[in-house]
């Protein structure tokens, strides 16, 4: 049977453990930020961002429109205003929003309006979402640099204030991993992903 002092020490240790775990969880939460991008088929974009150091999770979904909780087939009609988009959860101590924006512009064609490769429609348009003035300035600065350096002659990317993100159906999540033999994956997604990886080897996991 425990003495009073032993019980006191046991309770005290449990209390200390709870405090430590709470602080660790707080630190973990503080090391997470979110960013949102649309640059064509989310099957491709998801895989590109998943390959980056500091990226914790990438989810495919819909953003940029006005319809709440749209389905994939509703988005395909072009009537929802949404684009296929991704939500990137990342550790800003490892990878910066600026780097995520650089990856965004280097991993798709920001000069084609409502189109990426074989995919055509407003739901495939290029959008860089910002959540505050600092993020907007980073996006605007990157666009200016790309134009000033003649990397692109024009950029049609929308720079849009983020408002909402609706996660896509389960079968769209990790689509490339689950469907490696899909003709679209090996003919469109994989070449696009490999082209990106050749540009930014230093950012890869």
Image (cartoon, rainbow, N blue to C red):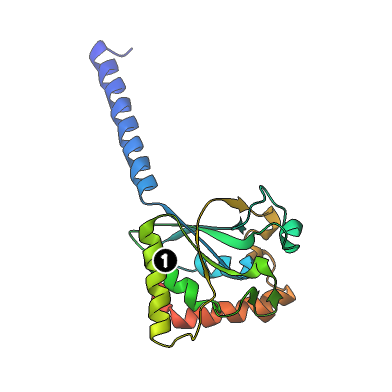
Q: Residue at x 66, y 47 (%)?
A: 68
Q: Is residue 61 left or right of residue 87?
A: right
Task: Pick whichever, 28 or 107, lies toward us.
Answer: 107
Q: Residue at x 45, y 82 (%)?
A: 199
Q: Which residue is mark 1?
A: 53
- Secondary structure of the residue carrying tag 1 is loop
Q: Looking at the image, how many numbered discs can be counted on the residues?
A: 1
Q: Is residue 63 left or right of residue 103?
A: right
Is residue 205 something that shows in the picture?
no
Task: Pick whichever, 28 or 35, lies toward us.
Answer: 35
Q: Is residue 71 above or below residue 179?
A: above
- Where on the picture, by quarter, is residue 184? bottom right
Q: Residue at x 35, y 35 (%)?
A: 22
Task: Pick whichever, 108 or 56, lies toward us.
Answer: 108
Question: Local crowd at mark 1 within 10 Å, few (<14), some, or many (≥20)?
Answer: some
The quarter of the picture where the N terminus appears is top left
The quarter of the picture where the C terminus appears is bottom left
Q: Is residue 90 above or below residue 156?
A: above
Residue 11 at x, y = what percent? 31, 21
Is residue 52 something that shows in the picture?
yes
Q: Residue at x 31, y 26 (%)?
A: 15
Q: Is residue 71 left or right of residue 156?
A: right
Residue 42 at x, y = what percent? 62, 66
Residue 56 at x, y = what percent? 46, 57
Task: Pick whichever, 50 or 155, lies toward us.
Answer: 155
Residue 6 at x, y = what percent? 26, 17
């Amino acid at each position: 049977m425990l003495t009073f002092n032993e019980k006191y020490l046991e309770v005290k240790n449990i209390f200390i453990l709870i405090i430590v775990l709470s602080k660790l969880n707080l630190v973990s939460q503080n090391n997470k930020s979110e960013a949102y991008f649309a640059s064509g088929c989310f099957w491709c974009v998801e895989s590109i961002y998943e390959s980056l150091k500091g990226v914790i999770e990438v989810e495919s979904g819909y953003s940029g429109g006005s319809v709440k909780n749209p389905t994939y087939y509703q988005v395909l009609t072009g009537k929802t205003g949404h684009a296929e988009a991704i939500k990137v959860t990342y550790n800003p101590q490892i990878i910066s929003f600026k780097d995520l924006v650089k990856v965004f512009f280097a991993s798709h064609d920001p000069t084609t309006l409502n189109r990426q490769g074989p995919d055509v429609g407003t739901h495939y348009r290029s959008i860089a979402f910002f959540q505050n003035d600092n993020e907007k300035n980073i996006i605007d600065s990157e666009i200016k640099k790309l134009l000033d350096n003649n990397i692109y002659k024009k950029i049609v990317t929308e720079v849009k204030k983020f408002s909402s993100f609706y996660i896509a159906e389960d079968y769209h999540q990790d689509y490339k991993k689950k469907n490696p033999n899909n003709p679209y994956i090996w003919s469109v997604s994989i070449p696009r992903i490999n082209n990106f990886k050749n540009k930014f080897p230093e950012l890869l996991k």
